[in-house]
Amino acid sequence: MHEFSIVQSILDTVEGYARQSSASSVKRVVIRAGAISGIEPHLLQIAFDTFKGHTVCSEAALEIIIEPLKVECCSCSKIAENTNPLFRCPFCGSTDVRLLNGEDLILERIEMESSDAETQDSP
């Protein structure tokens, strides 16, 4: 299950931002995951909940936004968005498509609290 190593990397990154911002805790971590990024959202959540204890994220909520697959058809030039990883144009049926997004895994937002109770957002 590679979600464990992904979560460890996320926690390391978040702790770095928290140190830079002198944050006392992290309240929310928002991840944007492409439909074909290779992660299982429920397993990522389990891994996050398992490893967040004893970190600055110990009380943090994890929000996972699933980004649909987006392709551009090279035959009819139309752009299609689909949550199913079908590399076929829904307009003309061509399989000659170019992937525009849906592969990424992005740390989109971190909501932190500083020691003076002021909430901060990063990145």
Image (spheres, rainbow, N blue to C red):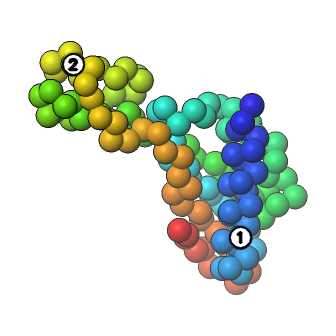
Residue located at (21% from left, 30% from top): 73
Q: Position of residue 64 (x, y in %)?
A: 55, 43
Look at mark 1 in the image and give the residue it sits on: 16
Q: Residues within 10 Å of mark 1 (few under 14, many from 20)?
A: few
Q: CA distance from mark 2 to mark 1?
A: 45 Å
Q: Secondary structure at mark 1?
A: helix
Label 1 amino acid?
Gly
Q: Is residue 86 visible?
A: yes
- The quadrant holding residue 88 is top left
Q: Secondary structure at mark 2?
A: loop
Residue located at (60% from left, 65% from top): 111
Q: Residues within 10 Å of mark 2 (few under 14, many from 20)?
A: some
Q: Position of residue 57 (x, y in %)?
A: 75, 59
Frontmost of labels 2 and 1 is 2
Label whose residue precedes the other's in the sequence (2 or 1): 1
- The quadrant holding residue 19 is bottom right
Tag shown at residue 94? 2
Q: Looking at this view, is 57 or 71 the one in front? A: 71
